[in-house]
Image (cartoon, rainbow, N blue to C red):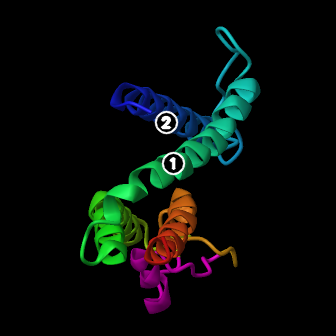
Amino acid sequence: MNKGNIISLQVLRGLAAIAVVVHHTIRALMVNNTNINMGPPWFVDNSILMNIGAAGVDIFFVLSGFIMIYISKTYETRSNPAKSFIINRLQRIWPIYALITLLLCFLYMVIYFKNGAIHFDLQLSRLASFLFIPTFNEKGLLQPILGVGWTLNYEMYFYLLFSVSILFK
């Protein structure tokens, strides 16, 4: 497989990621917030768009798995391939995840000080979500502070398992 084919797969993976964002946005507006009336659809029904967007998760993970297998050969020549692999993944994902989670915590604190109440439970154990460790939220659901970050929890555990598998070639 040449580099051009990988670039096209990366583009497809990017489109799948955009589909996931569309899914979460429509879901947040339609399902989680009943106070918003989205009106009649312009082109395609919103629930159809939401379902198409959900398929983006599957496409993204399948392509990501394939690309990881493809690039894993580059780690075989390194002195510590598993460590290099996991560090590269953490450098790509954790900074933006942590920043957005911090911003969300800050927003919750501002709302708390403004309104005196909030439907958010920030116990010390909840801070484990900064390390991709699932914790229970105020509703008893196993979910990180940044709700959609649940996929990153799975992704990071997959990366950890994959980095160990690199050791066994």
Q: Mark on residue 13?
A: 2
Q: Mark on residue 24?
A: none
Residue ID at (69%, 14%): 41
Identified by mark 1, the residue type is Ser
Identified by mark 2, the residue type is Arg
Is 168 in front, or is 32?
168
Which callout, 1 or 2, points at the residue further toward the start of the chain? 2
Q: What is the secondary structure assignment of the residue under circle 2?
A: helix
Name the residue tied to disc 1.
64
Rendering quarter of residue 163:
bottom left
Asked whether disc 1 touches disc 2, contact meaning CB atoms under 8 Å apart, the reply is yes
Residue ID at (37%, 65%): 101
Rendering quarter of residue 16:
top right
Residue 79 relative to residue 163: left or right: left
Position in image of residue 103 (x %, y %) = 31, 61
Residue at mark 1 to residue at mark 2: CA–CA distance: 7 Å
Rendering quarter of residue 37:
top right
Residue ID at (61%, 37%): 56
Is 118 in front, or is 17?
17
Q: Where does the magenta region start and end?
A: 121-138
